[in-house]
Image (cartoon, rainbow, N blue to C red):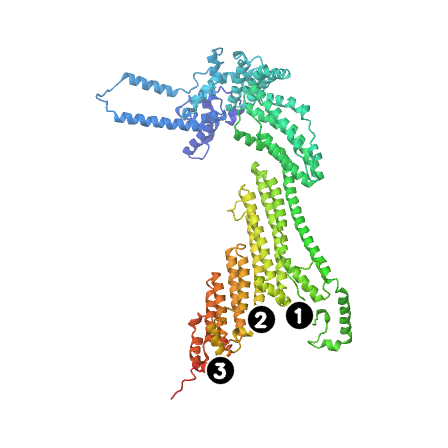
Amino acid sequence: MAANSANGGSRSRSILSALAATEILDGQSKLPAANQAAFVAELLVAVLDYLPVADQMRVARTSRRMQDMVYEDPRWVSRLKSMGCWDEREARQRFEDAVRRRREQAATQNSANKQTTTTIFDASTEEQRRKRATSELRDGFETMTVGGPAANTTSLEGQATYLEVFKNAKSIRGGARQEYGKIYGALAPFYFDIVKARTHTEPIVFKAFRDPETQAQMLANLHKFAMSDWSSGCMAREAKLNSMMTIFESAVMREFEQGYEFWDVDGRMRRFGHVLHALNGATSAIDVFIRKHPILNDTDMNFNPIECINRGQGADDVSLTPSQHFFDRLLLKVNEQAGVIERIFPDAEHVFWEFVDKVREDIIMEYTTPLFDESHERSLGMYLKAVSGIFEQTMRFFRSLKPPGAKEEKIREMAKVMVLRVFEPHLDLYLQEELEYFTKQAEEFVSLWEKKLSAQDSSLESYYMSNINRSAEKKDFLSSFRKVVMMPVTALPGMSFSSGSAAPSRPETPSLGRSSPVPGGGKAPTDELAAKAALMASKLEGIKSLCSIEVALSLVQAAKTSLGRAALLVPLGGQVGGEAKEQCSTIFVVLLRILGQRHVKHGFDLAVGHLSEYNPRDVSPGSHEKTGSSGGVAPLVMFIELVNVGDLISQMIDVFYEQQLATPKIADRNDFLDPANMAKKKFEQMLDESVAAGLNKGIDVLMDEVEYLQATTQAPTDYNPLPTPPSDKTASMLGGGLDIGPSGTATRIVALVSGHTGMLVGTTDKSMLDVFNGEVGQRLFTAICKHLKRQRVSVDGAVTLIADMNLYFEYIRTLRIHDLLPYFRALRELSQVYLIDPAHAKEMATVIADGDRFGGVFRAEEVYEYAQRRADWYQVRKDVERAMYGLECCVM
C-alpha cells in the first residue's frame, strides 16, 4: 500500500489492486491465516468510513462480503447522528412496534387453517420473491443525480422536498442507509456544486432557489449535511461552504441594518430576522439589535446611585427608595421591548433574555457597583444593608419581566441566573463581611454588659470599703511592726497575731438584709468584715443578673438580621447557595459560641463561685427567720431564678433554630454532623452542665441551711421535754392539750426544701430534676441522721420525733422518687425505738436486732448506736444488751 501511495495511484484505480497489495504484505507475516483475515477485515472496516460515499457504493459492488461491510447499519447511523437526524428513542419505538406486528401476524397465520390444496409452483409468488430479492440489493443511492440537482426545484412541492429533507428523515433500525441515501440524494449535488464555485453567483443553489428564505434554509441544510462529510478534503469543502454562507449572511445583514435604522420592525427587520434565523440562528442580527438598542443610551435611565446613601437616616443607614424608582422605570422599558422582539425574531424568548443580559451588564451593574463600593468605604453596616436590599429589588425586577411565551418556572430560573451574574463579584466579600460584622456586634453587646457589671461591682466595693481604708493601713503597719519586734512569739505555731486576718472581737456578724445596700441609701460599714459581708450579700443577690435576657435577645436579634440577609442568597442554589447556607450556619454557631461561652457560661461560673462563698452562719438570725418563714435560701432562690433565665434563653435558641434554620431547610435537624446541630447540642450540653454544677453547689448551700436550722431552732425539749407530773399529764390528755404534731424545726425544713425543689419544676428537664431531687433527698437523709445522733430523745419526746419522721416521709413521697422511700421509711421505723417503754427492754432489743424491719438501710449495730440517744439509755442499757447478746442465758 505504501508503494502504491508513492506512485500516486488515482481514485479511479480499482480498489482490488490495493487489496492485492495488502495481501502481499500480509502474506509475509507469520500470523495464522485466520488472524490475517480478521486483521484485513478490521482494517477495511476502519478505512471505509473515510471513503467518499460514492466510493463506498463501488466497494459494495465488489463482493457480497464487502457489501455487508458497507451496508452495516451502525456505519450509517453514525452519519445520521453527526447531522442530528437520529433519535434513539424513536428507533427503539419503531423496532418494538415492528416486532409486535410480526408476532401478531404470525399468531394470526397460525390460528387460521385455510390451506386446502398444495401448490407446487405459483408464478405470482415466485415473481414477488424475485422482486424482493432484487430490492434488497439496491443500496438506496440509485435515485440520486450526481451531475446536478433534480430538475423540479421551481415548484413549491419540489422545493419542499429539499428544504424539509431533514424533517422527513426517520430513525429506523436497519434502514439508516436508506434514510441517509435520501438526504445524500437531495443535498449532495448542491453541496459538491457550491464547494466548486469560484464566485457567489455560480452555485446552483442560488439559481434554483430565488427568495432569501429558501436560500437560507438550503444553506443551513448544506451546513448540516457537511457534518457527515468525513472523506479527504472535507475541511476545505466545509471552509468553502462557510465562505459562501458568510457572503450571503453579509448581504442579508445589510438589509436588516437598513430596516433597523428606520425602525422598520414589521417590514425588513422581521423578514430578514427570520431569514437569518433560518440560516444560523440569527446570531449576528441579535447582536446588532442588542448592541445598538436605544435603551442603552436612554437619558431617562441616568439615575445617581449615591442618592441612596445621601438619603440615609444615619451613618449606617441607606435609603432604597431611589433604587426602587430606578428598577421600576427600567422594568417598564424592558417589558415594552418584549413585544418588539417577538415581532422580529422567531425565537423571541431567547433573544429577550440576551437583551436582558445586556441591560444587566450595561445598566444595572453600572448602577449597583458604585453604590456597593461607596457604601463599603463609608460604613460596613451601610454596605450590608445596601447589598441585601438591592439584591431583593434586583430579584423582584427579574421575576417581574414578561418575556414572550415564557412560563413562570423559566422566568424564575432565568431570574436566578441574572441575579447571580449581577452579584457574583460581590458575594464573597459580602458573606465574609456579614459574618465579621455580626461577630463584632455580638462581642460588643457582651463586652458592654460585662463592663456594666464590673463598674457596678467596683462602685459597690468602693462604697463599702471607703470607711475602712485608713484603719486597714494602720493595721498593716502594726502587723509589720509585730513581725519585726515580736519575731520569737510569732514564730511559735498557732500564735500568729496578724490582724489582717484576725477574727472580729464580737461573736456576732453584722446583720445584713436581703436587699443589697445601695450607695447613698445608708451609712457604709466601718468594719472590714462587715464591708466584705455586705459585698457578699450584694453578689449573692446579683446572681440572677449575671445572665441577661436583654443581652440574649439583642444577640438573637442581631443574628436574625445577619442570617436573614445572608439567607436571601440560598435560593440561588449551586455553589453560591451552598456557601450562603454554610455562612448562615456559621452565624448561628458564632451566636451560640458568644452567647454560651462569653455570657451564659461565664454568668453561671460566677454564680457558682458566689454560692461557694455563702455561709449561713455569717447571716444574722433575723435573716434566717425570714428564710424560714418564706421557705427559701436567698442565694439558692436567686440561682434558681438564674436557671429560669438560662432555660428561657435555651427556649429562645430553640425557636430561633426552628424558624431561621430548620424551616427554610438551611440546616437539617436529622443530620447530626451538621455544624448548626453540633453547635446547638454543645450549647445545650454546656447549659446543662452549668445548671448541674450550680444545682450541686446549691444543694450544698441548701443542706448548710438545713443544718443551720437544725442547730439553731431545734430546742432540746422538743425530743426530751421536761418531766410532767402524772396528774398534769392526765389532765392535759383529757383536756386535749397534748401536742403530738411535728416540731417547728421539721416544719421549717420541709417548707425550705420543698420550696426549692418546687422552683425547678418547669425550668429544667425531668431527668435533671429527678437527679436534683434524688440528691436532695439523700443529703437530707444524711443531715437528719447526723442531727438525730446529737439529740436526747425521751419516751414523751418520741411522739414529736415520730411526727417529724412522718412529715419527712410524706414530703419525700411527693417527689415520686421510689429509691428514696426505703431510707425515710427506715427513719420512721427507727423513731419507734424511742417510744418503747423502759420496762420492755427485751422487746426493744428485738426491734434493734430485726434487720428486715429497716429494709437493709440500717444494720443492727447502727440501730444500737441510735438507741443510745434515748434519754433513759443508761437505765435500759443493761437489759437491752443482755437480750441482744444473750447474756441472760446460762449453761448448766
Q: Nearer the viewer, residue 698 or 619?
A: 619
First of labels 1, 3 by sequence position: 1
Q: Amino acid at mark 2?
A: Ala
Q: Residue at x 58, y 20 (%)?
A: 340
Does dot 2 land on a helix, a strand or a loop?
Answer: helix
Query: How far is the residue under mark 2 from the one under mark 1?
Result: 16 Å
Q: Is residue 804 left or right of residue 63?
A: right
**Which label sits on residue 508?**
1
Q: Is residue 139 visible?
A: yes
Disc number at residue 875? 3
Above or below: residue 711 compared with residue 635: below
Q: Earlier in the sequence, mark 2 or mark 1?
A: 1
Residue visible at 66% across and 31% down in the picture:
323
Which residue type carries mark 3?
A: Gln
Residue 364 falls in image quadrant? top right
| Residue count near mark 1 (Cα–Cα under 10 Å), binned few <14, some 14–19, many ≥20 | few
Residue 262: x and y, percent?
Answer: 63, 15
Mark 2 — residue? 711
The residue drawn where x is 23% and y is 24% is 113
Q: Quadrant of the C terminus?
A: bottom left
Which sits in the foreground, 735 or 374? 735
- Which of the marked residues, 3 or 2, is nearer the chain's N terminus? 2
